[in-house]
Image (spheres, rainbow, N blue to C red):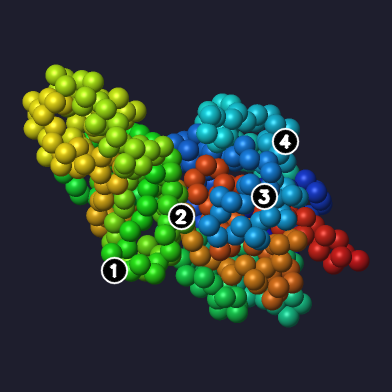
């Protein structure tokens, strides 16, 4: 019999196994993983560099990046936050670096550094790995131990940690045990937009402020975000879009991903302010072509597209801009409305809202309130965050708390 079985070989599963073994090397620990190795999201995160965490050590600030889980994580982040994670990896010879936007990556600039660290520690600490093993059922035995039933064996452990991410099959098994599950919906996704104004702008990136619009549904909560926006072949992406997708995850699922988005490409200005600047530019540059001369911090290709969308001919000089054209251009720059029809998700980095309801978990040790000896860590919980290393930080924090809880429980079982 195992002392601890960990279902799921992702970031949370590995980190929990390692932290548990470091706290008590005598425990018999195994990771049960349906893939060959696990750590799939670690491998692809951050474009293959692994966005380990975020340089946001203050828990009160850190939790503001979680659409779901903010209150639950405040205490845990005081206990094991970014500082502790950074210290852990540095102690293992994997120093992290901070980028301008606060994201933190291995100095080696490769997710393989994290994978190699975890695999090496798993081996040196004697943690078993049941690879290519799919669990068909989860049962609790009469002696309160746990049985994981697979196609060809029963894996029995005194304690069980669920770190299976957003695997719907595992959530069904947890529901069968009596845990309440919040419905899974995509949390991080890009917006599908077919619009002539951006049809030839793939690759253009700029700062913008965004506002969601639900025609005929004024009662819906206003959602806004600001930051870098990226035009893609299928629509729009970038941190600003992903913030909206995270905070609006359930709302956007309700409307079947059909809504509108208002974009201000000059986020430090409003429509009237921009209109005043356009009048001023017209007065001081009468002989210049509108298409080729402007004084806004905006990519040239985007400017050209918005000018044409405002009904301005290619060869028109500023002197000949009409009031209607100036108003239309100011509106396009600061309040252009785009129809969204669908979403695109990052298959490898898929993040969901939903999972085990947080009211059924003690966040002192991430233990089930229904079943002593059953723990949760990572995305299996109804916790998710915007991009920037915050989802991994949830994995590290909840995994560490679960590790401490399982070690304490193992000690009490001995006594």
Q: Can you tell which mark lies on residue 216?
A: 1
On the image, the x and y values in percent for residue 194 come to 20, 49
Closer to the camera: disc 1 or disc 3? 1
Front position in the image: 92 or 154: 92
Q: Quadrant of residue 367 in the image?
A: bottom right
User: Residues under labels 2 and 4: Cα distance?
Assistant: 29 Å
Circles 2 and 1, Cβ within 8 Å, touching? The answer is no
Dot 1 lies on which element? loop
Q: Position of residue 363 (x, y in %)?
A: 71, 62
Disc 4 to disc 3, how far (Cα)? 20 Å
Q: Is residue 303 above or below residue 44?
A: above
Q: CA distance from mark 3 to mark 2?
A: 19 Å
User: What residue occupies the far right of the structure in this picture?
Assistant: 415
Cβ atoms under marks 3 and 2 closer than 8 Å: no
Residue on which disc 4 sits: 87
> Is residue 326 among what the camera can see?
yes
**Circle 2 is placed at which residue position?**
246
Q: Earlier in the sequence, mark 2 or mark 4?
A: 4
- Secondary element at image label 4: helix
Q: Nearer the viewer, residue 324 or 23?
A: 324
Q: Are marks 1 and 3 in contact (CB under 8 Å)?
A: no
Q: Which residue is mark 3?
A: 60
* Neighbour tally class for label 1: few under 14, some 14-19, many 20 plus, Cα within 10 Å: few
Mark found first going from the N terminus, 1 or 3: 3
Along the line of sight, the residue nearer the viewer: 180 or 27: 180
Residue at 63%, 47% in the rendered image: 62
């Amino acid at each position: 019999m195992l002392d601890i079985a960990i279902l799921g070989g992702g970031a949370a599963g590995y980190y929990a196994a390692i932290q548990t073994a470091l706290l008590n090397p005598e425990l018999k620990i195994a990771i049960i993983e349906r893939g060959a190795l696990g750590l799939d999201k670690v491998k692809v995160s951050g474009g293959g560099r692994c966005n380990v965490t975020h340089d946001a050590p203050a828990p009160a600030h850190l939790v503001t990046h979680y659409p779901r889980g903010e209150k639950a994580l405040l205490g845990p982040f005081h206990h094991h936050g970014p500082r502790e994670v950074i210290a852990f990896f540095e102690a293992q010879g994997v120093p992290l670096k901070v980028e301008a936007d606060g994201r933190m990556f291995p100095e080696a600039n490769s997710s393989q550094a994290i994978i190699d660290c975890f695999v090496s520690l798993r081996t040196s600490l004697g943690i078993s790995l049941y690879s290519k093993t799919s669990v068909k059922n989860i049962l609790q035995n009469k002696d309160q131990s746990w049985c994981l039933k697979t196609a060809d064996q029963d894996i029995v452990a005194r304690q069980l940690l669920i770190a299976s991410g957003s695997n719907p099959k595992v959530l069904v098994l947890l529901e069968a045990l009596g845990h309440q599950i919040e419905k899974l919906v995509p949390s991080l996704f890009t917006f599908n937009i077919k619009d002539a104004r951006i049809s030839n702008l793939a690759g253009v990136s700029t700062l913008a402020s965004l506002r969601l619009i639900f025609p005929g549904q004024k009662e819906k909560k206003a959602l806004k975000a600001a930051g870098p926006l990226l035009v893609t072949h299928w629509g729009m992406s970038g941190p600003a879009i992903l913030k909206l997708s995270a905070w609006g995850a359930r709302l956007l699922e309700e409307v079947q991903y059909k809504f509108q988005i208002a974009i201000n490409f000059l986020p430090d200005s409003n429509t009237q302010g921009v209109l005043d600047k356009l009048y001023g530019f017209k007065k001081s540059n009468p002989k210049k072509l509108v298409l080729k001369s402007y004084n806004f911090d905006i990519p040239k290709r985007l400017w050209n597209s918005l000018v044409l969308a405002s009904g301005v001919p290619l060869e028109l000089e500023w002197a000949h801009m009409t009031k209607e054209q100036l108003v239309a251009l100011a509106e396009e720059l600061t309040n252009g409305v785009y129809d969204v029809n669908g979403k695109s998700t990052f298959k490898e980095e898929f993040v969901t809202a939903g999972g085990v309801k947080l009211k059924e978990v003690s966040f002192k040790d991430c233990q089930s309130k229904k079943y002593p000896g059953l723990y949760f860590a990572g995305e299996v919980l109804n916790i998710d965050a915007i991009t920037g290393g915050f989802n991994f930080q949830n994995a590290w924090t909840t995994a560490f708390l679960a590790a401490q809880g399982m070690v304490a429980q193992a000690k009490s079982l001995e006594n």
